[in-house]
């Protein structure tokens, strides 16, 4: 991971880079080796909103909580290792990686509690979609353009798949995915 930072933010940048480097092997075990370098650029304003594009993350690093650094790094490292043209796969796996990180650090219940923080957002999105009376195909997770669904609900789907088929089978399926063949 490469971290670009403002003068005076050295300690925060080092903490972020150290946290990310510690979880690289875990993320690689799940999503394979990085195909691009994860890059983080520090934002000068501490209250600025983070922005991501692929494996690039623009975020304030000054005073970042180390637990939040791990969540951001897990998400970012997943994007560096795994690509899909489908938002529910691309973002869903990155959010799933965050839940995996929480589970690795604090146990299964902590991961379930973390995922619970996302439940209200996707429940509201599903309600909006149902009220719109769209056809079933456009309401599906695979076709949605609603961020709450392709991020949060997809995270739950990946978690459920892991519970159903096991880690080994899911890792194998993820490793065999070829985005260019996903039609």
Image (cartoon, rainbow, N blue to C red):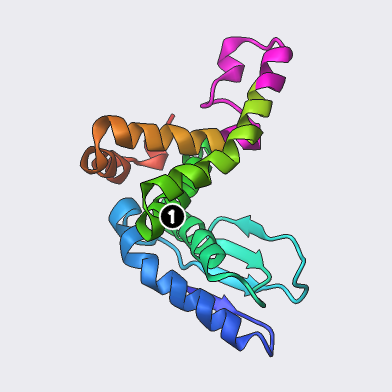
Crowding at mark 1 (Cα within 10 Å: few <14, some 14-19, many 20+): many
Could you tell me residue 155's position as x and y percent?
A: 48, 39
Query: Is 122 above or below relative to 113?
Result: above
In this rendering, position of residue 11 left or right of residue 102? right
* Residue 81 vertical placement versus 48 (above, below): above
* Above or below 10: residue 157: above
Residue 139 painted magenta: yes
Q: Mark 1 points at which residue?
A: 102
Residue at x-position 53% and y-position 70%: 66
Q: Where residue 6 sits: x, y (%)?
A: 69, 84
Depicted 45 relative to depicted 157: above or below = below
The verdict on residue 132 being magenta is: yes
Residue 12 showing in the rendered view:
yes
Q: For residue 169, which quarter of the picture?
A: top left
Q: What stretch is highlighted in magenta?
A: 127-151
Front one among 123 and 10: 123
Q: Residue at x 65, y 32 (%)?
A: 146
Measured from the top left, where is residue 92 in percent x and y? 49, 41
- Residue plotted at (68% across, 89% down): 8
Left or right placement of residue 15 versus residue 26 in this view: right
Counting from the top left corner in percent of width and height, residue 120 is at: 64, 33
Report the residue that reaches farthest toward the front.
109
Q: In this rendering, does residue 84 appear at all?
A: no
How many marks are shown on the rendered structure?
Answer: 1
Q: Which residue is drawn at 47% across and 52% down?
A: 98
Q: Which of 63 and 182 is in front in this view?
A: 63
* Helix, strand or loop under label 1: helix
Image quadrant containing the C terminus: top left
């Amino acid at each position: 991971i490469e971290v670009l930072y403002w003068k005076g933010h050295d300690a925060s940048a080092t903490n972020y880079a150290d946290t990310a480097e510690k979880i690289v092997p875990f993320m690689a075990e799940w999503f394979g080796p990085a195909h691009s370098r994860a890059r983080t650029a520090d934002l000068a304003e501490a209250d600025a909103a983070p922005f991501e594009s692929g494996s690039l993350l623009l975020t304030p690093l000054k005073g970042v909580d180390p637990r939040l650094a791990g969540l951001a790094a897990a998400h970012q490292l997943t994007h560096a290792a795994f690509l899909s043209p489908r938002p529910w796969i691309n973002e869903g796996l990155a959010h799933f990686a965050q839940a995996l990180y929480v589970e690795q650090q604090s146990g299964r219940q902590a991961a379930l509690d973390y995922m619970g923080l996302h439940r209200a957002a996707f429940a509201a999105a599903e309600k909006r979609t149902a009220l719109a009376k769209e056809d079933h195909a456009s309401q599906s997770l695979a076709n949605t353009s609603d961020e709450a669904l392709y991020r949060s609900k997809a995270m739950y789907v990946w978690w459920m798949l892991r519970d159903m088929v096991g880690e080994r089978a899911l890792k194998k399926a993820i490793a065999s995915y070829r985005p260019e063949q996903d039609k």
